[in-house]
Image (cartoon, rainbow, N blue to C red):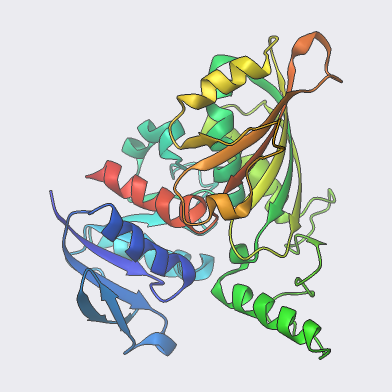
Amino acid sequence: MAKNIAIAGVTGAVGQEFLRILEQRNFPFSSCKMLASSRSVGKKVTFKDKEYTVEELKHDSFKGVDIALFSAGGARSKEFAPSAVKAGAVVVDNSSAFRMDPEVPLVVPEINSEDIAKHKGIIANPNCTTIIGIVPVWPLHRANPVKRMIVSSYQAASGAGQSAMLEMIQQAREILDGKPVTCKILKYQLAFNVYCHDSKIGPNGYNEEEMKLVKETRKIFHCPDIAITGTCVRVPVLRTHCESINLEFTEPISPEEVRGLLETAPGVSIIDDRQANRFPMPIDATGKDDVYVGRIRQDESIPEGRGINIWVAGDQIRKGAALNAVQIAEKLL
């Protein structure tokens, strides 16, 4: 059944990806509102061969809207999502505003799509690092419960938005030309450099990105006791996050068993050629829907064959954000 939809934050990187994915997946809609901040009002957006004019995101923007896809930042989500719900829309929110609210489902459709039915007007999209990491972990956890999960993330500039991607390109040009490096969007030089994720450090020494991974995974898995620790790092890649994931299972498990489970898992593709030393790279996953998995090997430091290492790559803007939200919207149909 066709729906009236709205895109809040349509001019951003994720907002633009919303439009591409809605068109590619032939999402059924009767009308579409293009919403953004006041500075984008009047801009033209082309969607399915039709030109739309961007309107300002306001409290009265949602009359007649059935589904509102939000990627306008946490502050705007908190301000405007309740108005959308009041107007009768279901909000799928890409920000962190509602993720840990016990009244709001936090959903990865390949994992816990049944939670969508519990919504009270708002459904939260998890953090990109969480989504990309747990899509391949879930089928393994379901077969053999994971006791402990250690994640090291290698996060692309896209996680900081379109402006960060453009600034990284600018930085590379400046460095090669021997000019001073611009750091207006990115906190530090990212071109030809690596730095720890610059989200706020908490009293426990972990940054917000790392704690999102911990808390969100527990909520999505409905497993509050799973032990998770992470180290999140920004790397000079335009888009697609990579993660090194170490898993300790309840029972013994072999790389062959892991490969067999992942070969049939939704949203997962395998690139795992040891002979050619060929494993997932950002260029493999960019623009793709699946999370790519490789380096599937036994962790020989964990006794009884209960440890596995994997390496994953997933497009942060796509499955890590826009695609996941659109998949939730499809479930709402």
Q: Quadrant of the C terminus?
A: top left
Establish if 227 lies above or below 77. above
Front-most of residues 113 and 256 = 256
Report x, y in % for residue 261: 53, 20
Residue 34 appears at what percent x and percent y? 30, 74
Residue 309, image quadrant: top right
**Going by the image, does 5 lie left or right of 304?**
left
Q: Is residue 232 above or below residue 295?
A: below
Measuring from the top left, give residue 8's x and y in whole percent.
37, 69
Compare residues 224 and 280 and report the one nearer the observer.
280
For this view, does 62 lie left or right of residue 20? Answer: left
- Which is nearer the eye, 162 or 60? 162
Number of numbered discs visible in the structure rendering: 0
* Quarter of the figure with residue 213: top right
Can residue 270 be seen in the rendering of this structure? yes
Q: Is residue 224 above or below residue 249?
A: below
Give how far across and how far down residue 166 sits, in percent: 60, 78
Answer whether residue 222 is visible to the viewer in this image.
no
Q: Looking at this rendering, what residue extends furthest in the front direction?
A: 276
Residue depicted at x 62% and y 43%: 280
Q: Nearest the camera: 21 or 14?
A: 21
Compared with 135, 81 (above or below) is: below
In the rendered structure, the answer to whether residue 238 lies left or right of residue 171 reads left
Q: Residue at x 49, y 35 (%)?
A: 268
Left or right of residue 87, residue 15 in this image: right
Q: Residue at x 87, y 20 (%)?
A: 301
Residue at screen point 63% across, 33% down: 272
